[in-house]
Amino acid sequence: MLEVKYITNDKGERTDVVMPLADYIEILEEIEDLRLIAERNSEELFSHSDVLEANRYLSSC
């Protein structure tokens, strides 16, 4: 569980967050992991049969 403290304005609205640096770094790393997953999901996929065919072709060279 994250240890966060909120800073509020005169109306009681949350305007800022204070948290331990280690928690902040962990969040940044998780965001980067999610970005990489999203990037990988947009990569072109090859069917298993296409990969096998390419392997056979390369093996015969």
Image (tube, helix red, strand yellow):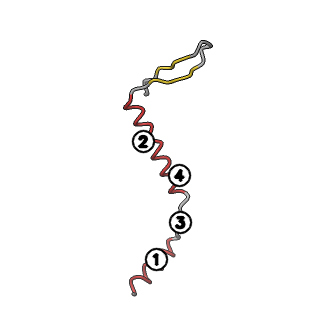
Kind of element beneath mark 1:
helix
Specify few, some or many for label 4: CA neighbours under 10 Å numbering under 14, 14-19, or 20 or more. few
Label 3 close to label 4 by CB (< 8 Å): no
Please, what secondary structure does the residue beneath circle 3 have? loop
Q: How far from the left and from the top, in percent, is residue 20?
A: 39, 26
Q: Amino acid at mark 3?
A: Leu
Q: Residues within 10 Å of mark 3 (few under 14, many from 20)?
A: few
Q: Residue type at mark 1? A: Leu
Please provide percent x and percent y for residue 47. 53, 70
Residue at far bottom of view: 61
Q: Say which quadrant the N terminus sits in.
A: top left
On screen, residue 38 above or below 22: below
Q: Is residue 45 left or right of residue 19?
A: right
User: What is the C-alpha distance between the residues marked 3 and 1?
Assistant: 14 Å
Q: Residue at x 46, y 77 (%)?
A: 52
Would you say the residues marked 1 and 2 are in contact, meaning their CB atoms lie under 8 Å apart?
no
Disc tally is: 4
Q: Amino acid at mark 2?
A: Glu
- Secondary element at tag 4: helix
Q: CA distance from mark 3 to mark 4?
A: 14 Å
What label does residue 29 carry, if any? Answer: 2
Label 1, on which residue?
52
The mark found on residue 45 in the picture is 3
Of residue 42 and residue 51, the one placed in the foreground of this image is: 42
Q: CA distance from mark 2 to mark 4?
A: 14 Å
Real-space Cα distance between discs 4 and 1? 27 Å
Q: From mark 1 to mark 2, how far is it between C-alphas?
A: 36 Å
Viewer-nearest of labels 4 and 1? 4
Mark 3 vs mark 2: in front: 2
Q: Looking at the image, do the residues carrying marks 3 and 2 touch, with CB atoms under 8 Å apart?
A: no
Residue position marked by numbered label 4 in the rendering: 38
Residue 61, labelled with which disc? none
